[in-house]
Image (cartoon, rainbow, N blue to C red):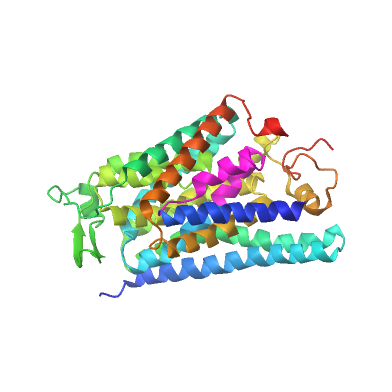
Amino acid sequence: MDTGFALWLFAVSLGASALGGMLGMASGIFIVPILTMFGHVEIHTAIGASIVSVIACSCGGAAPFLKNRLTNVRLAIVLETATTLGALTGVLLVGVVPVSYLFFLFAAILFLSAQQMLARRDSPNRTFDSRGTDQWAASLRLDSSYPDHVLGCEVVYKVQRVPVGMTLMYGAGLISALLGIGSGVLKIPAMDSALRLPIKVSSATSNFMIGVTAAASAGAYLMRGNIVTAVAGPVALGSVIGAAVGARILMVVSNRRLRLLFVIVLVALGIEMLLAAFSVHLTKGSL
Amino acid sequence: MKVPPRLERLLADLLSYGSWLASSAIGLGFSLAWIDSRVGTHNLAILPNMLIAKVGIALFILLPTLRVLLMLLFFFRERDYRLAIIAALVLTIILLGFILGIRTMSAIAGLPLSEPEIPVAFHWKATSCNQSGADGIAPSPC
């Protein structure tokens, strides 16, 4: 029975992560809803397990991005000051924010992800606004370039509006710590709109930063005893294997239909979480 | 194609080898626990195995911290002091997170969110009265 539960956790994380990996999206957003809704795991334990899996996916998937020079490591460490500070704030709020608010916030993030998944652009070749030079970007030498295999050339980009980006990153870090998600869903648009980075650089750098952001809050969750080995272990292992599998089959599957399925799942989970926020436990009623 | 710069290569190696090591530890711990539950040894035999898995989880949490430390040392050696200071700042904030966890532990101890670890490890195998499906994570009626 209990070994069965561990296997269930492993399988569910693997599936969610593989599905997420196929669309280049982190699975962290699925872990907490699935664990609380269907596994009846206490929400803080679910968040603790999720934050470990978020770190695992970030670390496990970072190498190819780094080797292809898509990750802007200098920019990442600068922005991490804001994300980790946000995470600390989130950790402080965990004990204060009522559980129903957590469910509500989670529903909002799920709907936001669904909306983003529908609106995601396919064309990577956008012209970059490289007129203005940000003072911060200049003094910290954040501007860089990356090799684009589709365009077949080196794309030079400039980092814009660093202070705005930092502010948004603080918010992303806070949400990440509070809900146990990587909040790439908030980081990527922030980089896209404020810093004006190419989408490939945004997602690679976001993935790289997620691990450190999550580590700041995972430390606190660990010390508080919210990271339960029997739950976090199978979830982390399943996620990291699933992400690797998902990235492999990324090219094979028809993207469009999969994306639609993803949106439906996100919306369904969002509605579940919303209902849970109003203390209507649909799935619990059956037990 | 240009070769990735040295820092990127170092980081890629640290993160991928670290992930392999941590995942293997978790996998090993759970596999041993599973074998134990098959063979049917007594409950306590499972605890050391879960400890291996626990070390794997701790390693995953430590990995990004080590990554920041690596960047700090690299920037310092390159005499890129601004970035080195920023890396040191990030490292400090992460360590503050750990301290904050210890500090707030007692404050939240009264709330049901801090379920101790050991009972779960016991429940891991020995619950026959568990009907809630929560497997000892949520307080069960028995």
Residue farthest left in this picture: A131
Total number of numbered labels? Answer: 0
Question: Residue B74's quadrant in the figure?
Answer: bottom left
Q: Which residue is at a point 46% across and 49% down the rendered structure image?
A: A213
Q: Which residue is at a point 58% across and 58% down the rendered structure image?
A: A238
- Residue B102 relative to residue A113: left or right: right
Q: Is A93 in front, or is A232?
A: A232
Query: Does any portion of residue B100 appear in the rendered image?
Result: no
- Percent position of residue A25, x then y: 42, 51
Whether B39 is among the magenta residues is: no
- Residue B67 relative to residue A285: left or right: left
Q: Which residue is at a point 30% across and 56% down the rendered structure image?
A: A201
Query: What is the magenta segment's predominant secondary structure?
Result: helix
- Percent position of residue A202, x then y: 32, 52
- Residue A277 relative to residue A283: left or right: left
Question: Residue A63's quadrant in the figure?
Answer: bottom left
- Percent position of residue B83, x then y: 33, 57
Query: Does any portion of residue A118 appear in the rendered image?
Result: yes
Q: Is B21 in front, or is A140?
A: B21
In what quadrant of the picture does the C terminus of chain A appear?
top right
Residue B43 sits above or below residue A186 on the image = below
Whether A48 is among the magenta residues is: yes
Q: Is A181 in front, or is B83?
A: A181
Residue A24 sits above or below residue A185 on the image = below
Residue A175 sits above or below residue A8 on the image = above
- Percent position of residue A162, x then y: 27, 45
- Range shown magenta: A24-52
